[in-house]
Image: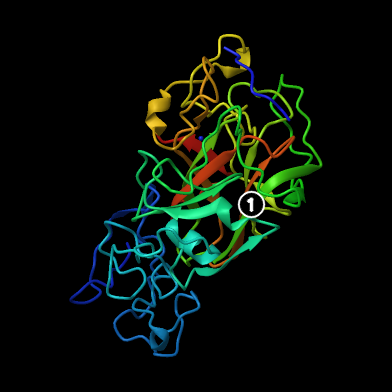
Amino acid sequence: MRHVYSLAFFLVACAPGGRNGVPRTATTGAGDTASDGGSANIPSCNQFNPSPDGDQDSDGYTPAQGDCNDCNPSINPGAIQIPGDMTDYACNGKPGTLPSCDASNTGLRDATSLAGAFELCDPRFFLSATLLGPSDKRARKVKATFGVLPPRAGQNMALLSTGIAADKNDPDFDSFNEEDPGTDLSDSNTQPNPLPMLPGVSGCSQTQPDTVYDYSELVVKLKAPSNANSFSFDFQFFSAEYPVFVCTEFNDEFLVLQESDKEFGAPTNIAFDMQKNPVTINNGFFAVCTNDKSKPETQHCQHPVSDIKGTGFEDSPGPEQIPGGSTGWLTTTSPVAPGENVTLHFILFDEGDHILDSAVLLDNFRWGTSVVTVPSTTPIF
């Protein structure tokens, strides 16, 4: 058994009253700004008496199919509404409003409920959710809160863990200490490392193992809205491996792999720190913690562990030992092409052995209209 020693993340508006809107600027749900269609409006288009079966703006929708502005390809039944913008992009009479989908799934563990917990539910864009691998149901749960942490959006969020997905207020909670150092979900819960060639952190001499443990993978399949050029989601990574096992082979990891033909030729990790390191306890974003003076790689802490009080990851595993920590809330944004199919793999696993647990919260998925060229992850603090 591994022991824990005491070593000191223009639209012409389809608005009520007609289509005689004027050009203006819209703000996307991801906090981006984008023109709401002035440059996209087709000057020669007949916007007042369009052919019911025509598609003047070539967006794939006719007036007979519900396109309420057949002169602008950003407005059609396959578009996403933009919060705060009164242009009826989706032609559903609900401008500025996104559907709610997580009001009643707290405590559930199935894939669809987990996806709904971070705002993936619109049937036009959410195609499916599945759990892959030998994932243990105890390692996932929809949570209304996680310790002191409330949802970033909606009424709850998804929690994945390499142990028991619970906080101190949950009867399923399993504390971390030297006598009980985490949850071994199952000796059979092993998987090939999905990205064994992904570089480790420079200076840690860390090589990626071929096999990983306590593996959880949530796969969601999506269709991008016709006016989307990007998407974003929020996450926070926690680990009891910090600080003792920083820069060792016992380094739990969170990956988000994107599959989309127009952006990447192969499944590509889109969640990483400023040095392109994967999300682990070695990550530069691991900042809700206590610096360990004996380890130079643990000097990124900026916020006290009281910021994650009640999660269990703020506790020390033993007397006079430094507690675990987290990345804090992070946002990942990645490019997408309008209307294309996208698959996202949210993957969490233990490295080195099953002992000591890590977890990740997922919340606030949203589509954006701004064009981005590469994925990025940034702190929310």
Of residues 103 and 183, which is closer to you in this image? 183
Q: Quadrant of the N terminus?
A: top right
Of residues 158 and 64, which is closer to you in this image? 158
Q: Give residue 347's position: percent from left, percent from top.
A: 63, 49
In the displayed structure, does residue 363 sit left or right of residue 181? left
Q: Give residue 281's position: percent from left, percent from top.
A: 60, 29
Q: Residue furthest front?
A: 179
Residue that appears at 44% across and 37% down = 311
Residue that appears at 41% across and 76% down = 77
Please determine whether, in this image, residue 88 is positioned above or below residue 196.
below
**Label 1's element?**
strand
The tally of labels here is 1
Residue that appears at 46% across and 80% down = 61
Of residues 178 and 69, which is closer to you in this image? 178
Q: Residue furthest left?
A: 17
Q: Give residue 330's position: percent from left, percent from top.
A: 47, 38
Of residues 188 and 219, which is closer to you in this image? 188
Q: Give residue 25's position: percent from left, percent from top.
A: 30, 53
> Is any part of residue 368 visible from this angle?
no
Please determine whether, in this image, residue 362 is positioned above or below residue 40.
above
In the displayed structure, does residue 236 sit left or right of residue 26? right
Identified by mark 1, the residue type is: Ser
Residue that appears at 78% across and 31% down = 207
Please determine whether, in this image, residue 193 is positioned above or below residue 156.
above
Residue 176 position by quadrant: top right
Q: How is the image coloured?
A: rainbow
| Residue that numbered label 1 is attached to | 216
Residue 203 position by quadrant: top right
In the displayed structure, does residue 123 sit left or right of residue 340? left
Q: Quadrant of the C terminus?
A: top left
